[in-house]
Image (tube, grey):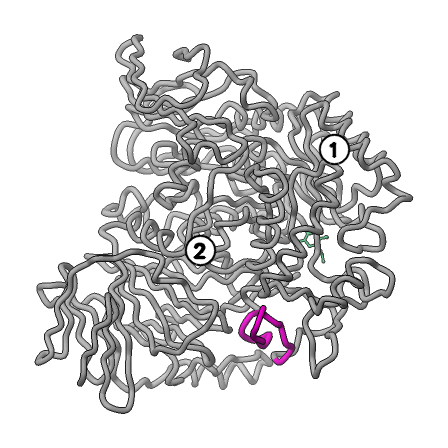
Amino acid sequence: MKFNVKDNCIEVSNGSKSIFVTIVTEDIINISDGIKSDFKQDKDKIKSNVKFEVLEKENSIKTNKFLIKVDNLVVDIYDLKNNPLCVNYQKDIVSKKIEASEAAKIVGHVVDEAAINNENMIKIKTSKDSLFFGLGDKPGFFNRRGYEYVNQNADVFDPHLENMKNIYKSVPFFIVKEPNFNYGIFFDNTYKSNFDFCYTSEEYYFFGAEKGSKDYYFIFGDGLKDVVSNYTLLTGRSPLPQLWTLGYQQSRWGYENENDVYKLVELFEYHKVPLEVVYLDIDYMEAYKSFTISKERFPNFKKLVSDLKAKGIKIVTIIDPGVKAEKGYYVYDEGIENNCFATIDGEVYENVVWPGDSVYPSYVSAKVRKWWGEKINFLLDLGVAGIWNDMNEPASFKGPLPDDVVFSGDDKQYLHEEVHNIYGHYMCEATYEGLLNYDGKRPFVLTRACFSGTQKYSTFWTGDNHSIWAHIQLAIPQQISLGLSGLAVVGTDIGGFGSNTTKELLCRWIQLGIFSPLCRNHAGNSTRLQEPYQFDQETIDIYKEMVELRYNLTPYLYNLLKEHEETGLPVIRPLLMHYENDKNTYNMNDQFLFGENMLVCPVVNQGDRNKRIYIPEGDWYDYFTKKKVPNGYSIYDAPLNTIPMFVKGGTIIPEYKNVLNLDNPEKIEELYLNCFGDSKCVHYQDNATDFKYQNNEYNLYEFTVKGNKLTTKMLHNGYKEYKSIKIK
Ligand code: MIG
């Protein structure tokens, strides 16, 4: 075995084959077969000067944390005491799965046998007690042990349930929690990939892809937190959003004309439910053509936007990637002229989406991204505040795009099979850059499809859920999983998208939805109307109270988003992130932490008027009554108008009072400190609009409350301070 060291990369070769081990940071090791792809995480961006030693005789590399053994070009990672951490499973695999698949075929299921005994799969030993987390939006419980998955972005119409292997998003990152240590694996491969978390065997898990390279990162961390932090160090974190994006958002596929929108705003005003953003779905366009507006249904679009703007309400418009194949339509003509669209056999490739025959922009090209970004100016000039990217798996109505559709880069061509999973990612990059270049404000992009790293550009929603209790239940583990996968700024369609909601489901969903960074009610076009006033006064009252609570909690949420930007930690967290030694938290899918110190226990069963809650160690208080609650399990009262939520002793929740619109952050001058005992917090404030905070224009307050006495220390002073800070 030959070792060849270049900077922090060690090439290990047996004469005919090589493997590359890169010491990215002291916690992150990259293992690669050296096959290049243009879509790989750029490990050179992280400057590493971690010391390591090559022990040639032992065929090993030693860092200050790990012993990396490379016998026979198989890379196994041990700790310095020689305890295995991430070690390949070398026994022959006798797959139970093959037997199972015979039975499955008989009953007509399609079985993906690609992963079975495939030499491209990387099989790692694991213990009987290991847990698996992450992998993006896969439906089901957040502990993935016992399931197998596929990464292949797909527009899935059927109700998302735990038997589904893939839906819209591909995030090839997962966390393994062994009894005494945690680590993550980021499989840096954009092709369709497979993951098996002790579905086939209890002795190992595996991951891999038939195509592309074998390239993955071993990401260590003392706790789950550190693993997520290290993963997002590698793939990026969401920058702070504009404040208004945290307000209440109303959407529906079915606001068909200007009048619908004016009426909607009027009804929200009439019922005094705060409203920050209205979404326009595909009906605002002319024949579903991106970057057009229907003259018939939205004749005075600009006036509509400015009338709403005068009330502090923003408009966000949907954009679909599929461009109608129609000569004379400017987007199509420009794209054809500049070779912006995917091709097959040298001809522009067509499939069918909403506009009918449509073509697909090749966002893997920087030139195309720039063009697309500039197209957005059409909407921004009219005053649109953000862009909602849909259908970017990419979706197609006339069968899937063939693997060999060609997407041209700037000087290279790629096949669909390589870039399918990153199509949405690059569409979001194009959109983000377009918005940023327009006015320098923090871009608001919302996307359905994505890949690892899209968090740098976009907010996410979980796609077409249904108005069913199974999906309010799913909302908790799904958002937890997204957060553990680096996607912190997320939300579900409040009330449910498909199917008809009920009064009770809507009330319970808003109680959960106010804790999502994206708080948006959205519904499908043929379903029952589900704006808060579509039921009775009780519904309006419950809904309104929740939305007001959301506004009150905005400064706390904004702090959490700042924390995400700095550490990569999510907003919605599983309890086990902060209580790793408490086994009761390992599979807790029906309550979550909103930041470290707030515990939310939504009711997610029809008819329930109480909730079985679990309070982990420490002193915890009911948010509303401030009464101390017992640790462990108990049954807590939860009538329809109540969301059980708790705060840990010693916490200050920074809040607003009577701030029911966030359009003008500079005008918000009062802060209220909701204290739970003698308490302390660090509070972040900036103009919540642009990127000046990156040039020191922000404040960092340290509040200490003892008895009724508040002490404020400015840790950083670079922005206009609040006029008044009061204990609530
Ligand atoms: O094929 O634009 O997930 O939010 O309302 C359906 C219409 C297309 C799917 C999105 C949904 C949106 C809908 N879209």
Which amino acid, by three-letter code, is at mark 2? Phe
Residue 627, quarter of picture: top left
Which amino acid, by three-letter code, is at mark 1? Gln
Rendered view: 695 above or below 526:
above
| Residue 462 drawn in magenta | no
How far across and how far down the image is residue 66, in percent?
Answer: 16, 64
Magenta highlight range: 404-419
Rendered view: 175 above or below 645:
below
Q: Is mark 2 within 8 Å of ligand 1?
A: no
Q: Residue furthest right?
A: 296
How far across and how far down the image is residue 262, in percent?
Answer: 81, 30
Q: Residue at x 47, y 82 (%)?
A: 114
Name the mark on residue 141. 2
Name the mark on residue 389. none
How far across and how far down the image is residue 436, in percent?
Answer: 58, 43
Q: Quadrant of the N terminus?
A: bottom left
Q: Residue at x 63, y 63 (%)?
A: 155
Q: How crowded is the residue under tag 2: few (<14 C-alpha within 10 Å), some, or many (20+)?
A: many
Taking the image as shown, residue 19 lies to the left or right of residue 329, namely: left
Q: Secondary structure at mark 2?
A: loop
Q: Quadrant of the C terminus?
A: top left
Q: CA distance from mark 1 to mark 2?
A: 32 Å
Taking the image as shown, residue 383 lies to the left or right of residue 211, namely: right
Taking the image as shown, residue 609 lies to the left or right of residue 354, namely: left
Residue 715, quarter of picture: top left
Residue 490 visible? The answer is yes
The numbered mark, 1 or 2, whose residue comes first in the sequence reads 2
Q: Residue at x 54, y 66 (%)?
A: 421
Residue on which the image places disc 1: 534
Residue 218, quarter of picture: bottom left
How far across and how far down the image is residue 543, in percent?
Answer: 62, 28
Q: How crowded is the residue under tag 1: few (<14 C-alpha within 10 Å), some, or many (20+)?
A: few
